[in-house]
Amino acid sequence: LRLGVTADSDDFTADTALELEFLTALVWAPVEESRRVVHALVGDRSVRAVSDQPLDAIPLSSALFLSPTHQAVFGAVVDLVDTDTPLTPTLVAERVTARGDHNRAQRTLLDMAAPTRAPLPGGVEVSHLAEKITDGWYRRGYIALTMRMQEHTRASEPGELAGAWRDLSTHQASAERRWRGVHD
């Protein structure tokens, strides 16, 4: 599983609630707005065809969502956007089923189809929620980075620490470029 790192269980609960709100807003937003947001987050299909690691977008292999179920639903959303298929709860559910994730995603799909806290009409909040999702991904990356460096300080030879820090700093710079790219 590609799980992100959170500071505590309250953060996990708040972040996964935000993820569901974002996914719901995304499928209820106008087609062009949804497409624009997905392309801002992960790049369009042509960019991803050239490289799985877009320079100014988040790679699909990254743990953008804490919930594996939300990650699976977002994968279905990306599939639909890539084929110029409109996003609707029904079409997203069909794609999730085709990807083999329907059983674990059933509750999420029901929540998206009949939200108790419906998104605002016209998709006005989807960009804002996408920024918050990206901010959470970026913040969790720093938590993971510091945890990795702590592990290096325990397990690596002293002469290897500077190289480990340099490698992690390169990774951080790439994440920052992607975070800025999404926000731009």
Image (tube, rainbow, N blue to C red):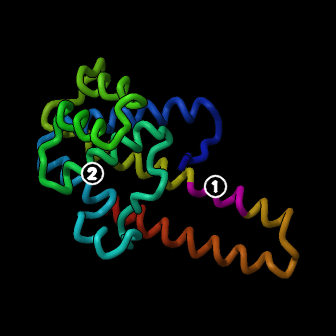
Mark 1 packing: few (<14 Cα in 10 Å), some, or many (20+)? some
From the top left corner, tell me how far across and down residue 68 is, in percent.
Answer: 47, 40
| Foreground pick, 2 / 103 | 103
Residue under the image location 64 percent in, 76 percent down? 167
Q: Is residue 147 magenta?
A: yes
From the top left corner, tell me how far across and down residue 154 is, in percent.
Answer: 86, 62
From the top left corner, tell me how far across and down residue 165 is, in percent.
Answer: 70, 73
Q: Is residue 81 magenta?
A: no
- Please name which of the two marks, 2 or 1, marks the residue nearer to the observer: 2
- Rendered view: 43 above or below 167: above
N-terminal-most mark, 2 or 1? 2
Disc 2 element = helix
Residue under the image location 41 percent in, 62 percent down? 59
The answer to which quarter of the image holds residue 6 is top right
C-alpha separation, residue under disc 2 versus residue under disc 1: 26 Å
Residue under the image location 56 percent in, 35 percent down? 11
User: Residue tagged by mark 2?
Assistant: 78
Counting every numbered tag in the picture gives: 2
Q: Main secondary structure of the magenta part?
A: helix
From the top left corner, tell me how far across and down residue 21 is, in percent.
Answer: 34, 32
The answer to which quarter of the image holds residue 102 is top left
Disc 1 element = helix
- Rendered view: 158 above or below 117: below
From which residue to which does the magenta span run? 141-148
Label 1 sits on what residue type?
A: Ala
Q: Is residue 61 left or right of residue 166?
A: left
Q: Quadrant of the C terminus?
A: bottom left
Label 2 sits on what residue type?
A: Val
Q: Which label belongs to residue 8?
A: none
User: Residue tagged by mark 1?
Assistant: 144
Residue under the image location 25 percent in, 51 percent down? 79
